[in-house]
Amino acid sequence: MSDTAAFLRRHEGLRLHPYRDSLGLWTWGYGSRITDRLLIEALENGCDFPLTLPQAEALLRAGICIATQDAKTLFPRFLSLSPLQQIALTSLAYHCGYGELSQWDGLAEAIAQGDARRAADEVLFVDGKSCAQVSRYAAMFPARAHETSALLLDHPA
């Protein structure tokens, strides 16, 4: 979990005060989405509820546990993958969420077939083709997408 946590800390950054992420969703800590309706309503009315560092770390650990379970569910070969590939898929599950990641059919197919090159390309390009348009994920999060792609190829970033 510590390597995954380090990857997420580096890419998510830490914000102890709630903020709206790139999608306009209330978020805090290391990219943890705030889902409690009462808390969101209070934030939208100008209230502020900062986290402490231990709270942010606890949310990160909980998020990694959930993301790891999601990755195991979505990618049945997960446990047979290398530690770097597991970090990549757990990070994608943490960042995208189960729902969005479950719709990434090309990635799931590439992982199921053991095709690391195609899986890495799926993160970077539409339809996993290197001559294709840059994927929405890579367009929004270029550094993270390139590092995730490298991890899927079993290369430390």
Image (cartoon, rainbow, N blue to C red):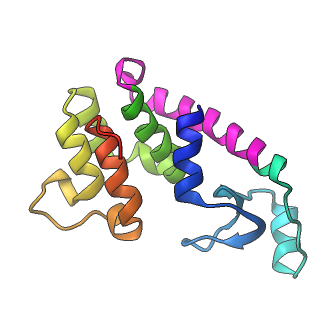
For the view shown, which residue lies furthest in the bottom direction?
A: 46
Q: Residue at x 89, y 66 (%)?
A: 49
For the view shown, which residue lies furthest in the top direction?
A: 80
Q: Residue at x 42, y 31 (%)?
A: 86
- Residue 34 appears at what percent x and percent y? 74, 59
Please say if 37 is above or below 8.
below
- Residue 18 appears at what percent x and percent y? 77, 68
For the view shown, which residue lies furthest in the left direction?
A: 131
Report the number of discs: 0
- Majority secondary structure of the magenta segment? helix
66 falls in the magenta region: yes
Q: Residue at x 9, y 62 (%)?
A: 131
80 with respect to 100 (left or right): left
101 with respect to 109 (left or right): right
Residue 124 versus residue 4: which sits nearer the camera? Answer: 4
Q: Quadrant of the N terminus?
A: top right
For residue 22, what is the image quadrant?
bottom right
27 falls in the magenta region: no
59 with respect to 89 (left or right): right
For residue 152, what is the image quadrant?
top left
- Residue 125 appears at what percent x and percent y? 22, 59
- Residue 36 appears at what percent x and percent y? 81, 57
For residue 113, what is the image quadrant?
top left
Q: Residue at x 49, y 44 (%)?
A: 91
Image: magenta residue range: 57-82
92 with respect to 61 (left or right): left
Please say if 131 is above or below 150.
below
